Amino acid sequence: MIYVDTLCFHYPHTQRPVFVDFSLHVPAGEFVCILGQSGCGKTTLLHLIAGFLAPIAGRIVVNGLPVCGAGPERAMIFQEATLFPWLTVADNVGFGLRAQGMGKAAITQTVTAQLERMGLAEYAHRYPCHLSGGMRQRVALARVLVLEPPVLLMDEPFSALDIPTRERLQDDLLTLWMTQGNTIIYVTHSAEEAAYLAGRILVFAPSGAIIHQEQVCASWPRDRLGAERLAVEQRLRTVLRNAATS
Amino acid sequence: MKSLLRTLLPFFIVVLIWHGLALFVLWQRGVPFPTPWQTLERLLELVRGAPLSGQSLGEHIFRSVYRWLLGSGLAAGLGISYGLLAGWFRSVEIATARIPQTLLLVPGLAWVPVALLLFGVGEQATLCMIFLAAFSPVAVSVLAGVRALDPALIRAARMLGAGRAMLFLQVLIPAALPALLCGLRLGLATGWRVLVAAEMVVGTGTGLGYSLIQSRWNLDYASSFACIVVVCALGLGVDQVLTYAERKTIAQWTLPRDTQ
């Protein structure tokens, strides 16, 4: 469960507030998508929940514990895969386990299982530079999922990928989420993606306030061309257009 | 075959230019300028044990390499430590980063009076000069490498649970490795150049630089040239070692240039 209470934040180099008394509650196991224009604070919110940034006022509580610093219980997937280029795929996936002090044999076993689950076993000894963008993002996903994080924070993770790869990774993510039941906050620019993935969609105004909330009732897996999903997408597009012109 | 040709071609070009130059100087100024062949003959004599400035060639090489490894090793160790430290602690960088940058501008031989005043004529003055000349390239390169580290990688490591020690050892150092190797290359090359020059002027009594200048005073130019060839060969050898180190590390995790 993520609980953001009357959060205030601005970056040190500017007095323009990103969040003023911002509150949000995400129950455990919910898949929330955040939509909004560039600069509305979507990524900043993820960074605050991840612990990369500290709020000026207010508090963030995740699974009963106040956030103070980054940690593997709030794993983040970035827009770029941010794999360590000097480590092989297997070593990248095992990085977090090594940080936890797990033994070498246990790490090998866990990493191998995770790579097999995600269809990456044959790439275990390759370096990231030899993988495609989609493959790298899958490794990044494997790297955090191996830690079994209760909360996943995803910052436009598939936006730089081609459509077939993006759609396949979206389906992979949904399968993993339905199996593991993590709480996911997923930032995206795409109304289509939000309508396909999320259980709840939040639309941010440029001021950082939530201007629209939508509960998507359709069950997973959803039909990409289904009427219900298309209707949600249409509504979101209208909200986004209005937000941009107001 | 192609790679052998690629390796040998520069040597052929140098030998050709050298031979042409030797003939031209002899014709134009009437001065016997050692040809590549004469130099090779003298080098072979020295290798077989002919004395050079009172010592064997092996002894001169040993003394030079010893001084170089000591001076450059010290400079590399301190330069790498400084670069990592200043890259890690912003306050250290703000307070000190201009110092190695300024030292970088001082030519190696300009340290002669400083080294002589500090240590007098001899071994320690030579080491001091090598250290002063080799430290800055290493320090500046490593610091630049650390500063260029992508903050997203630091964030990713912290998010995965890495503590400060793990961040330093398993993220910062490997990320700075390309710059570190580049700095080492520059530092060792600078140290080598300064070593030879220092041995010429500081009066060490042994070493390739010393025997090079002594042979010149004795008008034994073929020996001087043989020393230059040895200096080049040793420098190339070290460069090959560093290239091998690069191939075994960073070349594995970066794409070859022609596939990017």
Image: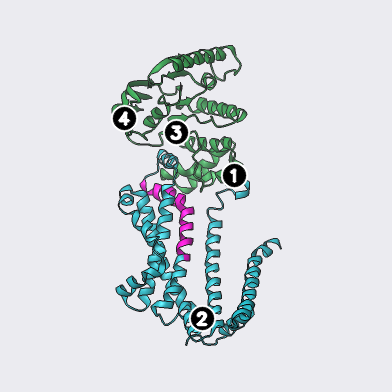
Chain colours: A green, B cyan
Q: Earlier in the sequence, mark 3 or mark 4?
A: 4
Q: Where is mark 3, residue-wise?
A: A76
Identify the residue at horizontal 61%, vertical 16% (top origin). A225
Q: Cα distance, mark 1 to mark 3?
A: 23 Å
Residue B95 visible? The answer is yes
For disc 4, the marked residue is: A55
Which residue is disc 2 drawn over?
B58
- Tell me where the magenta segment starts and ends, as one range: B164-189
Classified by dominant secondary structure, the portion drawn in magenta counts as helix
User: Of discs 3 and 4, which sits in the foreground?
Assistant: 4
Mark 2 vs mark 1, foreground winner is 2
Q: Amino acid at mark 3?
A: Met
- Both on one chain, marks 4 and 1? yes
Q: Are marks 3 and 4 on the same chain?
A: yes
How far is disc 2 from disc 4 in space, using C-alphas? Answer: 67 Å
Question: Which SS class for mark 4?
Answer: loop
